[in-house]
Amino acid sequence: VDATVLEAPSKLAFTARPELGAFAIPLRDRQEWLDFLALTLADWLEQVEGASTKALVSPAGPVVWAEGEAWGYRRHAYRRMADVLASDGEPWVRSAAPAMYEAVFAREPEASRHVVIP
């Protein structure tokens, strides 16, 4: 998902996680992509505050984020999702996505605002 919002791909497709085989997941059209962005963004906005109360260790071993740092996880991609939805989403999403993003991230503690975890 991140590659499709942070870069300008010629063809919209996602790639499955490496542990699942990293196979291509083609999309039918741009609207399906926008719908998936909205779902992905909304899901993270519901989780980020709670996720930041604990550290997350990957099943492969390394720490994904330390306690309090979940706010920085895929920070640029989530911001970009809100921006894309504000400009290209369905009419109700155009106002909702950036407003929800701003409302949630306004609650981010000052201590983690510098954290960026791609």
Image: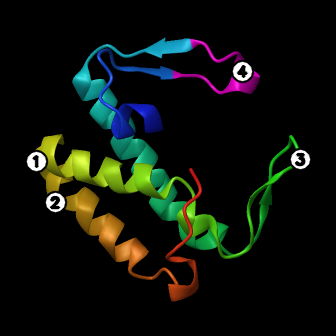
Amino acid type at circle 2 is: Ser
Q: Position of residue 63 (x, y in %)?
A: 80, 57
Mark 3 or mark 2: name the one nearer the start of the chain: 3
Give the crowd class for mark 1: few <14, some 14-19, many >=20 residues within 10 Å: few
Give the crowd class for mark 3: few <14, some 14-19, many >=20 residues within 10 Å: few
Residue marked by disc 2: 95
Give the crowd class for mark 4: few <14, some 14-19, many >=20 residues within 10 Å: few
Residue numbers of the magenta segment: 15-23
Task: For the residues labelled 2 and 1, say whether their Cβ atoms are less than 8 Å apart.
Answer: yes
Q: CA distance from mark 3 to mark 4?
A: 17 Å
Q: Under tag 3, what secondary structure?
A: loop
**Taking 64 as reference, is 75 left or right?**
left
Q: CA distance from mark 4 to mark 1?
A: 35 Å
Mark 4 or mark 2: name the one nearer the start of the chain: 4
Residue located at (18% from left, 42% from top):
89
Q: CA distance from mark 3 to mark 2?
A: 39 Å
Residue 5: tell me if it is visible.
yes
Residue marked by disc 3: 61
The disc label shown at residue 91, or none: 1
Residue located at (53% from left, 85% from top):
109
Mark 3 or mark 4: name the one nearer the start of the chain: 4
Q: Under tag 2, what secondary structure?
A: helix
